[in-house]
Amino acid sequence: MERSETPVWMSLAACKGKDTQIFFPRGGFGAQSAARICVNCPVVNDCLEYALDNEIYNGVWGGKSERERMRIAGRRR
């Protein structure tokens, strides 16, 4: 998949159509609001893997905050 292509799973995401600011909280506060949306998402694992594979460390992806994803990435190394 080329970087410019949108992954198919994104069209199934629970966050589709939501205010993107929810997923990019400022100062590390507010990630819980995004995580509540992610908890029932049918593609939460795809989202998390996408962020990890593409080294995306800002915002909430796959129901995980930036710090949580950095810890996961560190354990995988």
Image (tube, rainbow, N blue to C red):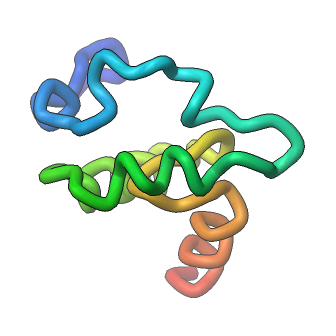
Q: Quadrant of the C terminus?
A: bottom right
Look at the picture and state if 50 lies above or below 1: below
Q: In this view, does 30 lie above or below 23?
A: below
Residue at 55 percent of width and 47 percent of height? 33
Residue 8 at x, y percent in the picture:
11, 29
Report whether 26 appears left or right of 76: right
Counting from the top left corner in percent of width and height, residue 65 is at: 62, 58
> How far across and how far down the image is residue 34, in percent?
50, 45
At a point 69% along the width and 47% down the height, the residue shown is 30
- Residue at x 39% of width, y 54% of height: 62
Q: Relative to 72, does residue 54 appear above or below in the rendering? A: above
- Percent of width and height locating residue 2: 27, 22
* Residue situated in front as seen by the camera: 10 or 73: 10
- Judge left or right: residue 20 versus residue 65: left
Seen as rendered, the residue at the extreme right is: 27
Q: Is residue 53 left or right of residue 13?
A: right
Residue 67 lies in quadrant? bottom right
Q: Quadrant of the N terminus?
A: top left
Residue shown at the point (61%, 23%) measured from the top left? 21
Q: How many labels does the image show?
A: 0
